[in-house]
């Protein structure tokens, strides 16, 4: 007979008690804010399906990065829009493209900020796929050198961490090799290891203008039904030299985050993606949910599942709420 000796409600009586025994504590320390860099200057255009998120030229990116650093957010991840798209996404590795110029500007401003970059071809290719196309199919091996070129150009511009999101097999090893050969052994790789083929990327594809022009990404991104396969993907990327790994999206895949956390002793990141953000913003705009409470609860769930790093478009709001300002 446990009652009346055991009364779990005893520890829920006041916020002081609840805070004291809380198992999962949120902080700004693992937050990463995603940003979209476009060519040009003085440009700042809001993404219609992602209120509060902008496509911005490098000069504007730096200004926002100042505010981000002041909020205590430790890191940003940059995505790029090209001037021109082509079959092989050649602007991905252009030293004068928007991402590379943004990194250089952030470095020049000496901000206390980790700079991560997304390494992929889909924003840069005319067909919108994450690798090169031959005979109507995305080719794995010929894409690897191009991804390594892009990662190297980010490292040269001053990136701390490169994050390949293309889901080609062997890309972590290709990038690691290229970085090491060129004197960038200290640049870390955050691999989008378990990246699912998800409908939740919809708003991002508007922001990055990266929707595939034919077909879909099912031949390279993971099938949402598979959990064991995620562990295999993570194991392979770690063997190839990934320093940190990511599960993406976050909320529909909390079980994957938990399994990965239990199996591997490396930092686990989760990407709270554009569609997850858009749903919260839309419901909040209609007054149907309390945005602050909902976002704090979602972040708690992602951390509770086992992610210590979270990429989220809510990062600035979260930092304000967590710092009580
Ligand atoms: C590029 C990439 C995508 C996202 C991050 N990197 C889109 C995709 O794979 O189609 C999605 C991020 C988001 O939805 O917020 N491959």
Image (cartoon, rainbow, N blue to C red):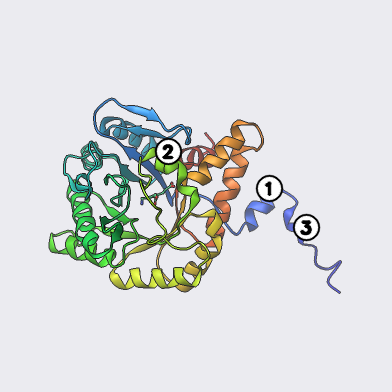
| Residue marked by disc 1 | 15
Taking the image as drawn, is residue 206 in sight? yes
Q: Circle 2 sits in a helix, a strand or a loop, which is it?
A: loop
Confirm or deny contact between disc 3 and disc 1 (CB under 8 A).
Answer: no
Farthest residue to the left: give it. 182
For this rendering, which residue is in front, 75 or 89? 89
Query: In the picture, residue 211 is in which quadrant?
Result: top left
Q: Residues within 10 Å of mark 1 (few under 14, many from 20)?
A: few
Q: CA distance from mark 1 to mark 2?
A: 25 Å
| Residue 309 point in image, percent of width and height | 44, 55
| Image height of 81 relative to 305, above or below | above
- Res. 132 mark: none
Counting residues from the start of the chain, the first of labels 1 and 2 encountered is 1
| Residue marked by disc 2 | 71
| Residue marked by disc 3 | 9
Which residue corresponds to the image point at 73% horizontal and 54% vertical from the top-left? 12
For this rendering, which residue is in front, 172 or 169? 169
| Residue 149 point in image, percent of width and height | 18, 55
Which residue corresponds to the image point at 63% horizontal and 31% vertical from the top-left? 286
């Amino acid at each position: 007979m446990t009652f009346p000796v055991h009364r779990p409600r005893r520890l829920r009586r006041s916020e002081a008690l609840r805070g004291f025994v809380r198992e999962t504590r949120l902080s700004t320390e693992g937050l990463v804010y995603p940003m979209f860099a476009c060519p040009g200057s003085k440009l700042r255009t809001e993404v219609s399906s992602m209120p509060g998120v902008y496509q911005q030229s490098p000069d504007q990116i730096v200004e926002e990065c100042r505010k981000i650093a002041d909020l205590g957010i430790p890191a940003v991840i940059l995505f790029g829009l090209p001037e021109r798209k082509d079959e092989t996404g050649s602007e991905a590795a252009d030293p004068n493209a928007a991402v590379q110029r943004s990194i250089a500007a952030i470095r020049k401003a000496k901000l206390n900020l980790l700079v991560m970059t997304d390494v992929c071809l889909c924003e840069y290719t005319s067909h919108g796929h994450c690798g090169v196309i031959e005979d109507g199919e995305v080719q794995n091996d010929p894409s690897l050198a191009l991804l390594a070129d892009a990662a190297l150009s980010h490292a040269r511009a001053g990136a701390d961490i490169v994050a390949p999101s293309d889901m080609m097999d062997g890309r972590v090893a290709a990038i690691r090799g290229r970085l090491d050969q060129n004197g960038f052994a200290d640049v870390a790789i955050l691999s989008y290891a378990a990246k699912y083929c998800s409908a939740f990327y919809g708003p991002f594809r508007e922001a990055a203008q990266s929707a595939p022009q034919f077909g879909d990404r099912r031949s390279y991104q993971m099938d949402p039904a598979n959990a064991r396969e995620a562990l295999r993907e993570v194991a392979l990327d770690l063997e190839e030299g990934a320093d940190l790994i990511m599960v993406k999206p976050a909320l529909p895949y909390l079980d994957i985050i938990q399994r990965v956390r239990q199996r591997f002793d490396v930092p686990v990141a989760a990407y709270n993606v554009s569609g997850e953000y858009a749903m919260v913003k839309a419901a909040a705009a209609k007054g149907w949910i309390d945005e602050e409470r909902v976002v704090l609860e979602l972040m708690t769930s992602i951390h509770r599942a086992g992610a210590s790093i979270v990429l989220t478009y809510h990062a600035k709001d979260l930092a304000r709420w967590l710092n009580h300002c």
